[in-house]
Amino acid sequence: MDASRAEEFEAFVRGRTPALLRAAYLLTGDQHLAEDLVNDALIRTHQVWHRLRDSSPEAYTRKIMYHLQISWWRRRKRSPERLTDVLPEPHADSRRFVDEQARSVNRLALQDALNKLGARQRAVLVLRYFEDMTESEVAELLGVTVGTVKSQSAKALARLRAIAPHLLDHPTSDRNLR
C-alpha cells in the first residue's frame, strides 16, 4: 500500500472508529468484545482498501462487522450475563450529575433489555433504529427477506415493551442513545 492510501486509511480509522464502536457495543453488549469486533472489521477493510477507494469504506466496514458478529453468535454458546437489580445510591452533587446519572441508568436498562433479545432480533433493532437503516438495507445486510426484518422488528419491539416497560415513559428514551 502506498503512502497516500495508508494516510487515507489512517484518517478513516481515526474519524469513524467512535461510531463503529458504538454500533459494535450495541451488538455485543460488551466494550471489550466491541473493540475486538471493530478491530477485526478494520483489519479486513485494510486488506481491501485499494478496492474501496471510490466506494463507501464505512459501509463495507459495517457490513464486515455485522457479518463477523453473526459468525461469533453462531460459533459460541454464551452464558447470559447477570446484572444486579440494585443500583448504587446517587450522589447529590448537582442537578447535572443527577440528569447524567438518569441517562446512564436508562442506557444500562436499554442495554440489558437488548441483551435479553435473540441475536437476530437485536441485530435488526440496532440496524433499524440505531444505525437508521431501511428495512431493505437491513434485509440485504443480514441476508434475509424484508418480511423477516419486519416480523423480527415487531417481535423484538413487543418483547422490549414487555421486558422493560419503564423505558417507554422515560424522558431520555429516544434522546441521547447514540
Image (tube, helix red, strand yellow):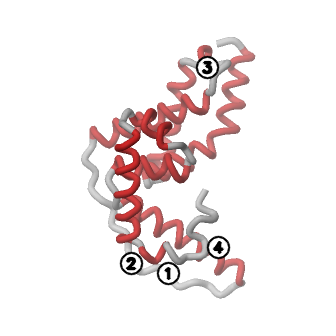
**Residue visible at 62% across and 45% down in the picture:** 19
Q: Secondary structure at mark 4?
A: helix
In depth, the one of 74 and 128 nearer the eye is 128
Quarter of the image holding residue 8?
Answer: top right
Q: Secondary structure at mark 3?
A: helix
Q: Earlier in the sequence, mark 4 or mark 2?
A: 2
Which quarter of the image is occupied by the C terminus? bottom right
Q: Secondary structure at mark 1?
A: loop
Q: CA distance from mark 3 to mark 1?
A: 47 Å
Look at mark 4 in the image and give the residue it sits on.
100
Please rate how many residues cluster around mark 2, counting C-alpha atoms within 10 Å: few if below 14, some from 14 to 19, many from 20. Answer: few
Q: CA distance from mark 3 to mark 2?
A: 46 Å
Look at mark 2 in the image and give the residue it sits on.
85
Q: Earlier in the sequence, mark 4 or mark 1?
A: 1
Please rate how many residues cluster around mark 4, counting C-alpha atoms within 10 Å: few if below 14, some from 14 to 19, many from 20. Answer: few
Look at mark 3 in the image and give the residue it sits on.
52
Q: CA distance from mark 4 to mark 2?
A: 19 Å
**Residue visible at 34% across and 58% down in the picture:** 155
The residue lying furthest to the front in this view is 147
* Tag 4–tag 2 contact (CB < 8 Å): no
